[in-house]
Structures are given as C-alpha cells and as structure tokens.
Amino acid sequence: MIFAQNFMKNRIRIERAILDITQADLAEKINVSRQTINAIESNKYVPSTVLALKIARIFGKSVEEVFELEEND
C-alpha cells in the first residue's frame, strides 16, 4: 500500500530574515522547540492548523502568505 505524503512550501525562513529573528526566537514566541521550527522550515514536518496560525500571526501575515500547498495537493 502506498501512502501519499502532503507537502507544503513555506516562507518561514524568509519571514524570519525580514524580522531579523532566529529559529529559537520564533520558537520561544509560539512555545515550541527550535527543532520544531527547523523541521517545518525544512519541510520535514507539516504544522497543525493552530501552529500555522500562530506562526502567521507573528509575521503579521495570513496563513496563505506563509504556507502554500504543493500544486498536486
């Protein structure tokens, strides 16, 4: 049996650079580990809706401005 894996592009690294904050800074603001931010940025982990909303709020953006589904999803 083959399972399709969902992939989601994100602009977290870019948005962090704009705000001049580290992965650790962002992680602290939304109460997750730096490793979680790294995994999301590296597309190894798809965040929950709540986490995606929190990240977008920090950047002052909509979720759709920070996260984007791959074309085939």
Image (cartoon, rainbow, N blue to C red):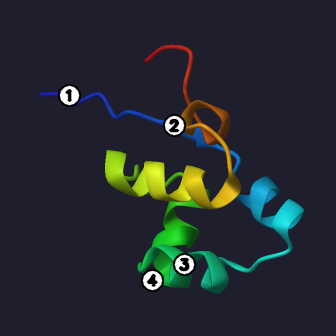
> Residue at the left extreme?
1
User: Which circle's residue, 2 or 1, is located before the other in the chain?
Assistant: 1
Dot 1: what SS? loop
Dot 4: what SS? loop
Q: Residue at x 55, y 24 (%)?
A: 70
Q: Determine whether label 1 and label 3 are within 8 Å by CB.
A: no
Above or below for 65 versus 37: above
Query: Which residue is denoted by mark 3 in the rendering?
Result: 29
Label of residue 8 in the image: 2
Q: Position of residue 15 (x, y in %)?
A: 77, 56
Q: Determine whether label 4 and label 2 are within 8 Å by CB.
A: no
Could you say which quadrant of the image residue 31 lies in? bottom left
Name the amino acid type tagged 3: Lys
User: Which circle's residue, 4 or 1, is located before the other in the chain?
Assistant: 1
Q: Quadrant of the N terminus?
A: top left
Q: Is residue 48 left or right of residue 69?
A: left
Label of residue 2 in the image: 1
